[in-house]
Amino acid sequence: MQQVTVEQAQQMIQPDRMMKAKKGQQGFTLVELVVVLAILALIIGVMSSGLFQSKEDAKVQAAKTQLLKDFPSAITRLVTMSNKCNNTTITYDKMVERGAPEETVFGGAWTVATSGGNTATVTYPLDLQDTALATSLKDSLVTAPNVKSATGTTAQVVVAYRCN
């Protein structure tokens, strides 16, 4: 029988331990995977809410630009050409020819009407979830120099423009 020294015994035992450690580490446990997925879901949830808000903010800014620049400019051009502010002078088709957009930034169709006086009223449909954004849009329109009045909800804004 052969005698084994302590060193030799340790060398023989160590590979055995390493094999057991490697065999036990073949993959991730179910708990580890669930924790990682929960963390990823949390991160995605936080980031996506900010992205959706940014998209709605951008649409409101584009709508504000249309309502403060494109529509008043088209109305002014039409009134300047005919010196009249009525339903035959200011129509959807004529306003689009003069630079007003064909549809809203939300993909809806806007309408225009005149009240027989010196006012052209544009009804502009919105598709907002945030009532604060709708209120902010309406408030920014009320203070514009060519706007007689503006009312609005999250579904639409109605702007009465002066035809002078």
Image (cartoon, rainbow, N blue to C red):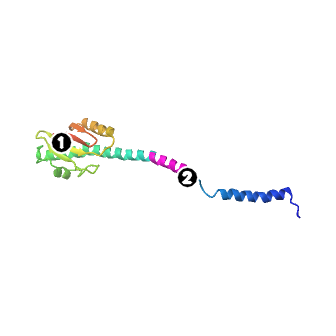
Q: Nearer the viewer, residue 140 or 136?
A: 136
Residue 115: give x, y in percent of width and height: 12, 40
Residue 54: give x, y in percent of width and height: 38, 45
Q: Residue at image x 19%, y 39%?
A: 160
The stretch of residues the image draws in magenta is 32-45
Q: Nearer the viewer, residue 103 or 130?
A: 130
Q: Residues within 10 Å of mark 2 (few under 14, many from 20)?
A: few
* 11 relative to 92 in the view: left or right: right
Q: Residue at image x 24%, y 41%?
A: 157
Q: Nearer the viewer, residue 23 or 46?
A: 23
Q: Quadrant of residue 10?
A: bottom right
* 123 relative to 89 in the view: left or right: right
Residue 142: give x, y in percent of width and height: 24, 36
Residue type at mark 1 is: Thr
Q: Is residue 159 above or below residue 95?
A: above
Provide the residue designation for mark 1. Answer: 121
Which type of secondary structure does the marked residue at label 2 adopt? helix
Provide the residue designation for mark 2. Answer: 33
Q: Disc 2 to disc 1, how far (Cα)?
A: 58 Å
Residue type at mark 2 is: Leu
| N-term mark: 2 or 1 | 2
